[in-house]
Image (cartoon, helix red, strand yellow):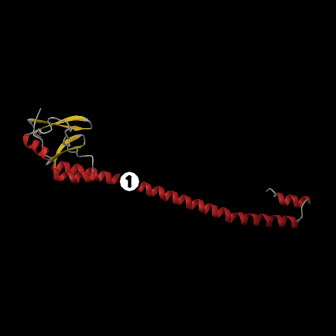
Amino acid sequence: MAISLQEQLLKAGVANKQQAKKAKQAKKKEKKGQAPKDNADQQAALEAARQAKAEKDRELNRQRQAEQAQKAATAEVRQLIAQHRVTLPKEGETRYNFVHDKKVKQLWINDGMLGQLARGQLRIAFFDDEYALIPADVVERIEQRLPDTVLPRPEPDQPDEDDPYADYKIPDDLMW
């Protein structure tokens, strides 16, 4: 077995027992003085790590809850549209043009539906890459869940102040 440096110095006569004892005591005091500091540093680091992990977990939970709320709202809107959609006629005689995403789209409807659209009793919803006619009383419930699902009603054109035909009103059901 290897002999410690202290024992070797004692055997060689370079140091005596009293010096060895003082060196041991100084070493112990040094360790004792540093240990609480190291322990406090470790405790502070552990506490900081716990707090960081807890904050990260809270953020992940918020994200998960937001995703679940979004999925639930999407499912509710899908169900509302499926239950309340107005069936388009298979052979609609009137082409209804409307604007969605800066593009002109069209639906083939009958004259009764055209009148309801003009009066605001029916609205157009775009969901799952499909257009559907929805009664106006359901629109508010859909917009609470997913606001951009129902297309806005067309705003009436405001005639220019110097328009010579401003006194002549164009009927809503006029087809070009």
**Whole-percent x and y of residue 134?**
17, 47
Label 1: which secondary element: helix
Closer to us: 67 or 139: 139
Question: Where the N terminus falls, by quadrant?
Answer: bottom right
Decide: few, some or many residues near mark 1? Use Cα within 10 Å; few <14, some 14-19, many ≥20: few
How far across and down, in percent of the image, does residue 111 sit? 7, 40
Would you say 49 lies left or right of 133 here? right
The front one of 37 and 137 is 137
Residue 55, compared with residue 152, is above or below; it is: below
**Quadrant of the rendered image containing residue 31:** bottom right
Q: Residue at x 21, y 53 (%)?
A: 140
Give how far across and how far down residue 163 sits, in percent.
Answer: 18, 35
- Mark 1 residue type: Arg
Q: Name the residue under label 1.
A: 64
Residue 16: x percent and y percent? 89, 64
Question: Which residue is painted at 71% across and 63% down in the image?
Answer: 34
